[in-house]
Image: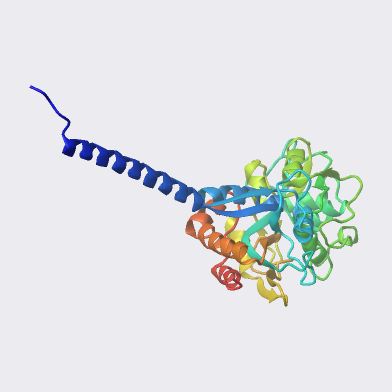
């Protein structure tokens, strides 16, 4: 018996093949669309303070891609305003990060507009190397006169009488203090020196010794005592502290946590000794004043943080800022990113990394500029 091809079966087989190809194309197209759904924020540069946060937020907001180079606030802002990426970093530049809010007079080369918004709170801690020190329970306490003297270069040994008084006992017989400071142009330096320029004055701290009064001004760079150890970036300062007996230096709260360094408990303006906790940094921000400024550019900054007055405020606290060009595509990308990354999940991630989520009032003001 002869068998002949069944036309219906042949047509069915052809239909199945076409259907399979169609499904394959749809699946492939879906995968491509999923990939294309990611929003690129471009390349950024700036404060080392924000590096851990931006890396961490990629897990909270996986729909966004970007590169970030922690070159310091000064170098990042220069790159942003000149539209020239720092040497050895990806280009073109599309955003920057800084702990130092910019002046309204700063302009982007070529007249391009830009936006500045605070995104997170951070403390500038005085981290120290505990080798050779008898550290009290709860950490070393430093009064305003003591830390002003250390950072002014007038207190040079851990056996100084004022440090002993702060801690209820002598914490070292003879351990020279080695101060580590930033060598690069840094927002952390700006925040610290802005605080010292306010707190380390007789008007703010009654009875402060003349030798401890701060007269070095405030800025992203200042003229430090020649005996201080210079290191580049927050990570560089932390590494130098960890490897130097008797060292103390200023690093942001996230870097301090990641490097597992102890930090001094500082006396604030209200007279309370406060550790650099998330709650204490947030408390400082709650006393800040929201300022919207700029004519052609949309800028937000938080004032009155140089010497916070609230009882539970950590005394050296700041808001950290993102700056990005006001091109519609970039603005829309960052608007969505900030809303997504700095929600409840982002706040929890930031807290785990040593940052302090912004109070709701500041978040609302930031998002209101878009």
324 or 172: which is nearer to us? 324
Rendered-image quadrant of the C terminus: bottom right
Which residue occupies the extreme top position in the image? 1
Image vertical order of residue 98 relative to residue 113, above or below? above
Give the image location of residue 163, x and y in percent: 78, 50
Give the image location of residue 19, x and y in percent: 29, 43
197 or 158: which is nearer to us? 197
Image vertical order of residue 224 relative to residue 177, above or below? below
| Residue at the (62%, 62%) spot, across then down | 330
Instruction: Give left or right: position of 57 versus 113.
Output: left
Give the image location of residue 94, x and y in percent: 68, 57
Where is residue 216, by image quadrant? bottom right
Image vertical order of residue 1 relative to residue 366, above or below? above
| Residue at the (25%, 42%) spot, across then down | 15
Where is residue 231, by image quadrant? top right
Instruction: Give left or right: position of 11 versus 278.
Output: left
Instruction: Give left or right: position of 20 versus 188.
Output: left
State whether residue 144 appears in this view: no
Rendered-image quadrant of the N terminus: top left
Image vertical order of residue 77 relative to residue 107, above or below? above
State whether residue 341 appears in this view: yes
Where is residue 191, by image quadrant? bottom right
177 or 69: which is nearer to us? 69
Which residue occupies the extreme right position in the image? 226
Give the image location of residue 232, x and y in percent: 79, 44
| Residue at the (76%, 46%) spot, across then down | 233
User: Which color scheme is applied?
Assistant: rainbow
Which residue occupies the extreme left position in the image? 1
Q: How many marks?
A: 0
């Amino acid at each position: 018996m002869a068998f002949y091809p069944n036309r219906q079966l042949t047509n069915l087989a052809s239909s199945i093949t076409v259907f399979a190809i169609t499904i394959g194309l749809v699946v492939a197209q879906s995968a491509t669309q999923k990939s294309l759904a990611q929003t690129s924020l471009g390349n950024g540069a700036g404060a080392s303070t924000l590096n851990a946060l931006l890396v961490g937020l990629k897990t909270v907001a996986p729909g966004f891609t970007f590169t970030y180079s922690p070159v310091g606030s000064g170098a990042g802002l220069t790159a942003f305003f000149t539209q020239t990426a720092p040497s050895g970093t990806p280009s073109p530049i599309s955003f920057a990060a800084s702990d130092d809010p910019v002046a309204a007079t700063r302009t982007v080369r070529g007249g391009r507009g830009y936006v500045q918004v605070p995104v997170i709170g951070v403390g500038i801690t005085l981290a120290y190397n505990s080798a050779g020190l008898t550290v009290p329970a709860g950490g070393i306490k430093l009064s305003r006169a003591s830390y002003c003297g250390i950072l002014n270069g007038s207190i040079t040994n851990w056996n100084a009488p004022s440090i002993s008084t702060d801690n209820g006992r002598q914490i070292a017989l003879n351990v020279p203090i080695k101060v580590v400071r930033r060598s690069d142009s840094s927002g952390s330096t700006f925040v610290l020196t802005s605080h010292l320029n306010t707190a380390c004055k007789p008007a703010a701290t009654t009875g402060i010794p003349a030798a401890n009064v701060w007269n070095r001004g405030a800025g992203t760079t200042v003229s430090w005592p020649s005996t201080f150890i210079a290191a580049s970036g927050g990570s560089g300062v932390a590494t130098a502290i960890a490897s130097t007996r008797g060292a103390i230096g200023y690093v942001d709260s996230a870097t301090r946590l990641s490097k597992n360094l102890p930090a001094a408990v500082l006396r604030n303006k209200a007279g309370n000794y406060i550790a650099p906790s998330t709650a204490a940094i947030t408390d400082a921000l709650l006393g800040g004043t929201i300022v919207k400024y700029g004519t052609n550019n949309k800028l937000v900054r938080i004032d009155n943080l140089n010497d916070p007055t609230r009882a539970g405020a950590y005394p050296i606290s700041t808001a950290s800022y993102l700056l990005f060009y006001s091109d519609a595509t970039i603005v829309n990308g960052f608007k969505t990113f900030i809303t997504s990354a700095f929600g409840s999940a982002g706040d929890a991630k930031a807290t785990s990394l040593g940052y302090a989520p912004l109070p709701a009032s500041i978040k609302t003001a930031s998002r209101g500029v878009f």
